[in-house]
Image: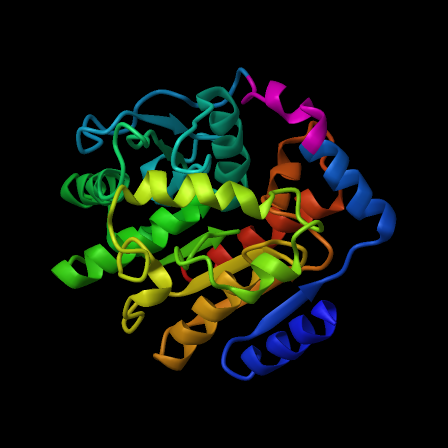
């Protein structure tokens, strides 16, 4: 019953927002889940020949890491990368490795944002940090049309929240954004949270800790903290990758539909049978098809808006 209702929602939403289904064999699905749960990805690191020197002197007062996989330099633009971790955790070494994979796919340097973390620094601090780094890029001469934002999990939430803040203040917006596996409705009312419980690797019970700790009393049904409750009119092009078995499937689908209805260019890549943060498979030394596909589709999409 859950699967049928999910398919009905996907069909209804695809009227407003294009959905590209990316199938995976049972073996591929099992392989990705094994990678995500085995701990093998925690040893990932950028290669020694990657460019890691600071490319600009200012990152808005926020600690950041530059990773330029192919030493393309600032002339190619910047990919602003916002890591996940439930608004609470970071793993800079692994995140630098992800920044390297993203940099290579995008053909431009990536800037990993070391935003402040809950519980010591709940909302709005992390959103302010992401926006501050973006403003610093603009102030130092990086054109908005040469910047793309990519965020994963909590980082995807922060990317959309920061875009809403920047839009409201009238800042030039980036070429586009790729929020992956985002929690976009902090009321946790998306039907897939119940429907995909047990399918996803992330348990729904985790939201009882993540959401109140991040919000620290802020309303869960207001923007920018809860992007689905904001006004998406005027947002830049969006590519929203999500796993079909994710708790946050409906968070992605509903945000994409709302953005598209409001006139934004929003499309969904639906990785069938994949759990939360499936894209981390790209960190593997020999990435499975899912990881390679994620990077290839990111590369192709960025070559358009970026």
Name the residue at 60% across, 76% down: 9
Q: Nearer the viewer, residue 225 or 156?
A: 225
Residue 288 falls left or right of residue 259:
right
Q: Residue 41, located in which quarter of the rendered image?
A: top right
Asked if one can make out residue 254 in the rendered structure from this viewpoint, the answer is yes
267 within the magenta span: no
Q: 31 or 301, which lies in front? A: 31
Please provide the residue range marked out in magenta: 37-47
- How many marks the image carries: the answer is 0
The one of 107 and 230 positioned closer to us in this rendering: 230
As drawn, 88 above or below 7: above
On the image, the x and y values in percent for residue 239 come to 49, 61
Q: Position of residue 278 (x, y in %)?
A: 64, 45
Q: Quadrant of the C terminus?
A: bottom left
Determine which quarter of the picture holds residue 235. bottom left
Q: Which residue is at 22% across, 43% downward?
A: 124
Q: How is the image coloured?
A: rainbow
Note whether residue 173 is visible.
no
Vertical placement of 237 versus 93: above or below?
below
- Return the x and y of residue 65 as percentages of the image width and height: 36, 25
Q: Quadrant of residue 142?
A: top left
* Left or right relative to 133: residue 26: right
Is residue 45 highlighted in magenta?
Answer: yes
Q: Residue at x 20, y 25 (%)?
A: 57
Place of residue 153 in the rendered image (x, y in percent of width and height, measured from the top left): 48, 45
Image point 76% across, 34% down: which residue?
Answer: 34
Furthest residue in direction top, as rendered: 48
Q: Quadrant of the N terminus?
A: bottom right
């Amino acid at each position: 019953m859950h699967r049928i209702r999910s398919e009905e929602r996907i069909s209804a939403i695809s009227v407003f927002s294009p959905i590209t289904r990316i199938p995976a064999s049972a073996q591929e699905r099992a392989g990705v889940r094994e990678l995500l749960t085995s701990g093998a990805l925690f040893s990932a690191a950028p290669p020694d020949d990657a460019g890691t020197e600071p490319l600009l002197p200012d990152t808005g007062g926020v600690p950041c890491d530059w990773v330029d996989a192919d030493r393309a330099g600032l002339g190619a633009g910047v990919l602003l990368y916002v890591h996940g971790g439930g608004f609470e955790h970071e793993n800079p070494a692994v995140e630098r490795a992800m920044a390297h994979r993203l940099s290579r796919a995008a053909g431009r340097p990536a800037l990993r944002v070391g935003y402040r973390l809950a519980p010591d620094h709940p909302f709005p601090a992390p959103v302010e940090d992401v926006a501050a780094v973006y403003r610093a890029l603009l102030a130092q001469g990086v054109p908005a049309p040469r910047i793309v934002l990519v965020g994963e999990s909590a980082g995807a939430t922060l990317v959309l929240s920061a875009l809403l803040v920047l839009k409201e203040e009238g800042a030039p917006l980036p070429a586009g954004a790729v929020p992956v596996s985002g929690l976009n409705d902090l009321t946790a009312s998306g039907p897939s949270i119940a429907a995909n419980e047990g399918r996803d690797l992330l348990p729904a019970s985790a939201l009882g800790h993540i959401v109140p700790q991040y919000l620290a009393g802020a309303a869960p049904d207001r923007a920018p903290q809860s992007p689905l409750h904001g006004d998406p009119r005027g947002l830049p092009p969006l590519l929203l990758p999500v796993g079909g078995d994710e708790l946050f499937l409906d968070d992605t689908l509903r945000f994409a539909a709302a953005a598209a209805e409001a006139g934004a260019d929003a499309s969904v890549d639906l990785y069938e049978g994949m759990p939360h943060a499936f894209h981390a498979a790209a960190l593997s030394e020999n990435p499975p098809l899912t990881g390679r596909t994620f990077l290839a589709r990111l590369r192709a999409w960025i070559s358009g808006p970026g």
